[in-house]
Image (spheres, grey):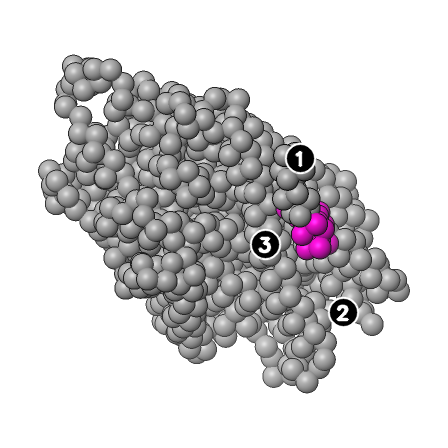
Amino acid sequence: MWERKKKSVWISLGAFISSSVAFASEAELHIPPLNTTYNLFGMSMQGTTLLGIGMLVAVLGMVFGLVEFLRIKRLPAHQSMLDVSHLIYETCKTYLFQQGKLLVILEAFIGACIFYYFSVLQSMETSRVLLILLWSVLGILGSFGVAWFGIRINTYANSRTAFASLKAKPYDVMAVPLQSGMSIGVLLICVELFMMMFILLFVPHESAGACFVGFAIGESLGASALRICGGIFTKIADIGSDLMKIVFNIKEDDARNPGVIADCTGDNAGDSVGPTADGFETYGVTGVALISFIVLATGMAMGADGKLAPIAGFQDIQAKLIVWIFVMRVLMIVTSIGSYWLNGAISRALFKNKDHFDFEAPLTSLVWLTSLVSIGVTYAVSYLLIRDMGDSLWWKLATIISCGTIAAAVIPEFTKIFTSSKSKHVAEIVAASREGGASLTVLSGLVAGNFSAFWKGMVMVGLMLIAYLTSSSGLDQFMVYPAVFAFGLVAFGFLGMGPVTIAVDSYGPVTDNAQSVFELSQIEHLPQISSEIEKNFGFKPNFERGKHFLEENDSAGNTFKATAKPVLIGTAVIGATTMIFSIILMLNLKLDLLDPRVLLGLITGGAVIYWFSGASMQAVTTGAYRAVEYIKQHIRLDSNEKASVKDSKEVVKICTQYAQAGMINIFGVIFCFTLAFAFFDPTFFASYLISIAVFGLYQAMFMANAGGAWDNAKKVVEVDLKEKGTPLHAATVVGDTVGDPFKDTSSVALNPIIKFTTLFGLLAVEIAVSQKEKAFFIGVLLFAVGLIFVARSFYGMRISRETVKEAAQSRKKREQIPSHAGV
């Protein structure tokens, strides 16, 4: 049975934080005084001063994001395009309001658990419990707020990009989406940093742990809901719109199709809202993990007697590492903006006046430039701030972080090998589709996805191995379990160039929407439009080349959306590793493969990952069926008029209904299973968490890259081969619709699901420990409730409730009706 102990269950390794060597609750996490003194360029400066300067830089970064926002808003666009983008934004607003209502309900569930744990189990005073709940709400509002900002700027940028394409020069078609992405990326990271540094500087040290707990849980909950719902919504709409190309042989964004507006809304709901909230949460939770580890595990050493003991001056060690981490985070904002400006100057010189260039080239150079500059800054800052802690510590920690930073550039390169429209794997899908139709399209995409998971897994293992080897000598004199800290720093390095990672990810929804805005505006069919544009905007439009550039740029957007996904999922898994070690060490577990509980936990984790993949795709499948059913009944192909706003809103309503129904089922299972498995057995639960992290990593990479390959194979047929409307095109459209929930629903949602499960699991363990006498029976009850939601995720979401026999009888009755009618 479990022995109840006052042990830390927050993102730590269960190390001691006081000379009495007593474990502390995560809400009692005491941030050390940060007024340690540094000698920088002959000047004496305290750590609090450096963090204060960091807050100012974060504010300036937010100003940068807002200035870029206003610059995009002031870019020219024809009124017909502005009207379409405004309609898209209005439907996005409706969707976000619905999501806000759902988040209130979910927060009520999690808030109840937080209140029970801290108030009842920990007997914490009400004011501190309310503080935790307040920061939980602020975490949700942070995720929700940056997601709203992302939608607003993207719906400005889509019409401006579409209009810029009419100049028949590709540079602006690339520059506007990238400018929009940088605005989102910089503002997102700066808001995150400002809030965390506010806690460090202005919240009393004895309450800082509570603030970080609430903030991390709120972020994780908000990101999970927005990612999952957005992923389901966007793919219902996308599939419903895409299938009309096959059914009626019409254009992808035909204005007569009432599903197109829903598709545009989904591009933002899934490809803007989800990644933005996800990035906000990932950056924050990783930071909280590192702070917690530093406070709880550094300054401790293992004595000869096998017991932990504090090192002399341990608070100074902790303070210096915390300040070091945040100064680097702040400077990464500066390096990202500086790299963006430098890369922009180079790109303008190379591409501004060209009639054609590779849209992927400026994005690739931006990623590599930022990565290399960030690595240089990492070594410089480490030398300046922590060189006096030990002759080798500064460069070892810088090297470990650089493993993650270089991974953020290398992994996208491996992603492009499997998903770029210029890759051999995508060419293989097109070749297979030409002769074998949709069947070989699907099989070739599965091959690409499987190979990509292998190679990217090897890259991650290699870089983590370097981090481990670097940490294995010298770091143990400053902390316990330095290898786990090293893995946390690798995750931090992944996010070191966070603004640029978010920027290239946000590039995709703008390029996708720009195509739709062009078609829905029907600008090329407006009377005397060429002379109007020439008179009002000073150039003669080229509609054909504009459409071509938009389609080609969308292919680049698809590729770079795919490159950001493994970076985020890799961070989730590496970060989750640190949290899982908390539980293992907290409960003194020995995960022996000869122990049946370990094997059962590993198998259960894999089962849950595959259930989640199926449940999220089932919601997409059923929702898409209903959307297609409605669109086929209401599309008016005998007219050149646009689909009515009423019909378009009905499709949006269908997408929202099934997205939220799917999300409720998924949340019910994750919530109940996390508590249930924690109540069953600690060894089983820790093994389960390891399993969902590992299974989730490879499932996500496989699905994301298979989907990306299918998507760009379709683009190759449409843009490079110009074979729209052919059997080859129909085959690749089928592949794309299969890949849609792969890449934009199931795979991307695994990231927040892993982190939320692990993070909430830490609280679940403490709750379970407190109920040791009846833990098993409570676990059985929660497991049974979870299975009800599992059943609902399929049986409650089915397209048809007829059995095969009943369907056959119905078909026979329908076939008999004409003969009887003719008698």
Q: Is residue 806 magenta?
A: yes
Tag nearer the camera, 2 or 1: 1
Q: Secondary structure at mark 1?
A: loop
Q: Residue at x 47, y 21 (%)?
A: 644
Q: Which residue is mark 3?
A: 753
Given residues 210 and 445, the one toward you in this image is: 445
In this rendering, position of residue 95 left or right of residue 392: right
User: How crowded is the residue under tag 2: few (<14 C-alpha within 10 Å), some, or many (20+)?
Assistant: many
In this rendering, position of residue 792 left or right of residue 242: right
Label 2 to label 1, Cα distance in Å? 71 Å
Q: Is residue 274 magenta?
A: no
Tell me if residue 705 comes above or below residue 655 in the rendering.
Answer: below
Q: Quadrant of residue 260?
A: top left
Q: Secondary structure at mark 2?
A: loop
In this rendering, position of residue 553 left or right of residue 563: left
User: How crowded is the residue under tag 3: few (<14 C-alpha within 10 Å), some, or many (20+)?
Assistant: many
Identify the mark nearer the N-term, 3 or 1. 3
Tell me if residue 84 comes above or below residue 251 in the rendering.
Answer: above
Identify the mark nearer the N-term, 2 or 1. 2
Please indicate, yes or no, whether residue 206 appears anywhere in the rendered image: no
Mark 2 vs 1: CB contact within 8 A: no
Residue 343 location in percent, x, y? Answer: 21, 46
The amino acid beneath tag 3 is Ile
User: How crowded is the residue under tag 1: few (<14 C-alpha within 10 Å), some, or many (20+)?
Assistant: few
Please indicate, yes or no, whether residue 521 appears anywhere in the rendered image: yes
Instruction: Tell me where the magenta segment starts and ends, as one range.
Output: 791-809
Tell me if residue 357 comes above or below residue 535 in the rendering.
Answer: below
Q: Secondary structure at mark 3?
A: helix
Given residues 666 and 293, the one toward you in this image is: 666
